[in-house]
């Protein structure tokens, strides 16, 4: 079936890499990196492979059942600075993502895809982000933010929801994400997965799927 739409993640695809932003935040706030990695490794593992009866902060933050301020409190309580001091919880999420910046070639490719007739959608797991919605004007046909719809990737329901909003079949939609687990989940629903690891490779693959030239790399 011909691909007629692109559904893309935001953080790590339309922005600079998440790891770069986190590294900047850890340094700026003087946070113990090893402690942060231990905490997040356990939380992320549980968020993607949940244990029955447990409450996971990432899961709750992403699907909107846990307020961002409460997530900040829980995470700050688990962290410490390099000298053993406490980490300020207020504004923690904003500081975590402060170094994000838009990847203009990806935005340009999506504009080119839309100009060529493809539909374009955003599908993002929210972390209480202040999204740069001003950059999205006239770019997306629909926007799906996890905390706003009460579902999160990799739940198949959120992929089906995005596809239905576009009015297309899953096989007519390419899905781009920097987290492979989410890509495989989308593929299980029938979408065409594109695991984002390199801007040029992703744009080239989308061009192939849509049958148009999106950029020169």
Image (cartoon, helix red, strand yellow):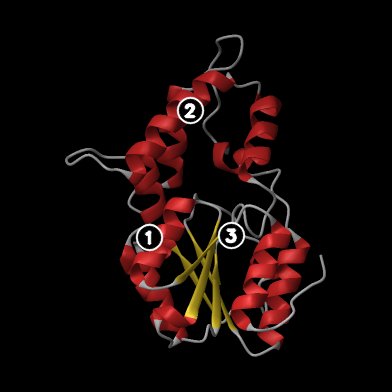
| Inter-mark Cα distance, 1 to 2 | 31 Å
Residue 80 in sight from this viewpoint? yes
Work out whether 108 lies above or below 201.
Answer: below
113 and 47: which one is in front? Answer: 113
| Inter-mark Cα distance, 2 to 3 | 25 Å
106 and 138: which one is in front? Answer: 106
Q: Disc number at residue 10?
A: 3
201 and 120: which one is in front? Answer: 201
Residue at 61% x, 85% y is: 118
Which badge, 2 or 3, is on the more N-terminal residue? 3
In the shown orientation, is residue 173 left or right of residue 49? right
Quarter of the image for the C terminus: give it: bottom right
Work out whether 93 lies above or below 113.
Answer: above
Where residue 156 appears, as percent x and y from the top left, is 32, 65
Work out whether 14 lies above or below 58.
Answer: below
Where residue 17 appears, as percent x and y from the top left, is 66, 46
Which badge, 1 or 2, is on the more N-terminal residue? 2
Q: Disc number at residue 185?
A: 1
- Under tag 2, what secondary structure? helix
Q: Disc number at residue 76?
A: 2
Disc 2 vs disc 3: which is toward the camera? Answer: 3
User: Are there few (<14), some (14-19), or many (20+) residues within 10 Å of tag 2?
Assistant: some
Q: Based on the displayed image, in which of its 4 quarters is residue 97 positioned?
A: top right
């Amino acid at each position: 079936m011909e691909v007629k739409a692109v559904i893309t993640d935001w953080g790590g695809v339309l922005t600079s890499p998440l790891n770069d932003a986190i590294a900047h935040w850890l340094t700026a706030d003087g946070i113990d990196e090893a402690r942060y990695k231990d905490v997040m490794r356990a939380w992320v593992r549980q968020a993607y492979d949940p244990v029955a009866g447990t409450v996971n902060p990432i899961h709750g933050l992403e699907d909107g059942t846990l307020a961002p301020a409460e997530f900040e409190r829980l995470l700050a309580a688990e962290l410490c600075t390099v000298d053993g001091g406490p980490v300020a919880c207020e504004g923690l999420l904003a500081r975590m993502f402060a170094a994000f910046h838009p990847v203009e070639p990806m935005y340009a490719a999506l504009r080119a895809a839309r100009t060529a007739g493809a539909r374009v959608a955003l599908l993002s797991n929210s972390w209480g982000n202040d999204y740069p919605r001003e950059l999205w004007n006239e770019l997306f046909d629909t926007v799906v933010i996890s905390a706003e719809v009460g579902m999160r990737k990799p739940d198949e329901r959120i992929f089906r929801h995005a596809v239905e909003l576009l009015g297309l079949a899953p096989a007519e939609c390419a899905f781009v994400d920097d987290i492979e687990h989410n890509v495989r989940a989308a593929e299980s629903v029938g979408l065409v997965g594109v695991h984002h690891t390199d801007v040029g490779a992703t744009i080239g693959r989308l061009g192939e799927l849509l049958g148009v030239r999106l950029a020169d790399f």
